[in-house]
Structures are given as structure tokens and as C-alpha cells.
Image (tube, helix red, strand yellow):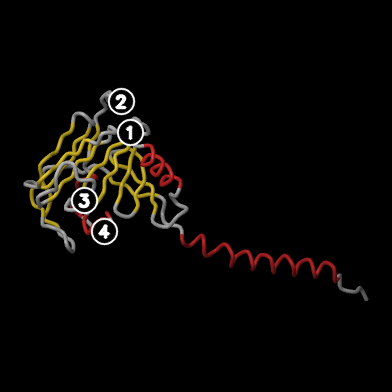
Amino acid sequence: MQQPNTKLIFTIFIIIAMAIIGYFIYAPHQSQQLPSTFSLSPQPSTQQASPTVTSQEPLVTTWTTYTNNDYSFNIPIPDGWKQQEYKLPSGSFIVAFSPNDLPCANCSYVHEGYFSIHIFNQQTDSEAYKAYTESLQKIGKVAGFQAGQINNIKGVIYGNTVEVENHGWVYQLVLDQNNGSENVLNSQTFIHAASSMQFTYLIFNQ
């Protein structure tokens, strides 16, 4: 009578054990990854929106358009909202929008802003540009970082921030509600504005 091949049985047992151990080591990490795409695509109309409201968000029924020819974009903002532009010495630019009065032009942070746009490139703000590239590398790897796009310009969405790069300039849209603790996906006002943003390319003075 032929004896069982103990060496073969032992090898099969080791392979099965390693497969089981590998599953429990790697499966949890795979399940933590978020979907890698989210699109903020243009909407048919930037002038009117259905009355929508989420918690701690003002009711918006009519819209107007903010246009900035220096930085080649326009974006719908709620009609009647205040706006404040901040030209930084480095060459970066911030514009803030709010239903309330905004702080002085030389304030470093828009505490009362509802949402703002910070525009910079590698020369005007190297640290912010480095942080932007690091955020891109986290897409699909770190929870909370998702790929996204605004008007077919690809970028990254995380927390209260959406960032896209157009001709070397990063447009960083920030939902400043609740001192920056809010998520962009919780604000219909922010989503409508960001998804309807349009870019026109000009040669910037660098």
C-alpha cells in the first residue's frame, strides 16, 4: 500500500495557511480606500438655482457671476453676497465670498468668509504648490482624498477643499464655513458654484 506523501501534504498546508494570513493582513487596507473619482461638472445654468439648503447654510435663490480676467475664470456666486479680493505680495491671489461683511483686505485668514478661492503657482507660493502635489499623490491611497475635476480640469477633492491646476496655476476652492471644518459635499451652495466655474486662459504676468 502506497504511503501518503507527507512532504506534499505539508507544502499544501503551508500554502493555504499563508493565503489565509495574507487575506487578513491586506483585506482591511483595501476596504478603507475610497472611490478615486468625483466629478464637479458644469451645470446648464449659472444664473438660477432651485432653492436648496443644508444645515447651517443660507438659502440661495438667485445667482450672479464673479469674473476675474487677471486670473482667467468666472464663477457663480449668490446674488447680494459680499466679496473681497486679497492680492498677496508673493503674487498669489485670494478672493472671498460671504453673505456677511468680510474683514480688512490685509487680514491673513478669511474668518467670516463663506467660501474663497486661492490662486497660486510654484513661483508665487512654493509651499502651497508642494502641498497640492502631495494631495494628488494621496488620491485612492489615503482616506478622504478623491480625484475630481472642475469643467474638465482634473484635480483633487479633500475635506473642505477642491484644487485643480490650469496652465501651471492652482485654483484652490475652500469652504470656509465653520472655520474650515465643513466638508464640500455638505454644501449645495459650494457645489453649485464650483461645478459651474469656468476657465479662460490668458498669459499671466509672472
What residue do we see at 22% from left, 59% from top?
178
SS for callout 1: loop
Badge 3 or badge 2: first in the primary sequence: 3
The residue depicted at 57 percent of the width and 62 percent of the height is 26
Residue bearing the label numbered 4: 182
Q: Residue at x 19, y 36 (%)?
A: 74
Image quarter of residue 153: top left
Q: Mark 3 belongs to which amino acid?
A: Phe
Q: Disc 3 on helix, strand or loop?
A: helix
Whole-Å distance between the Cαs marked 3 and 1? 26 Å
Q: Which residue is mark 2?
A: 206
Q: Secondary structure at mark 4?
A: loop
Three-letter code, disc 2 = Gln
Judge depth for marks 3 and 2 and give the one in front: 2
Quick check: marks 4 and 1 in contact, CB under 8 Å?
Answer: no
Residue furthest right in the image:
1
Amino acid type of the residue tagged 4 in the rendering: Glu
Amino acid identity at mark 1: Thr
Mark 2–mark 1 Cα distance, whole angstroms, equals 8 Å
Q: Nearer the viewer, residue 199 or 14?
A: 199
Residue hosting label 3: 190
Q: Verify CB contact (< 8 Å) between mark 2 and mark 1.
A: yes
Residue where numbered disc 1 is placed: 124
Query: Nearer the observer, disc 3 or disc 4?
Result: 4
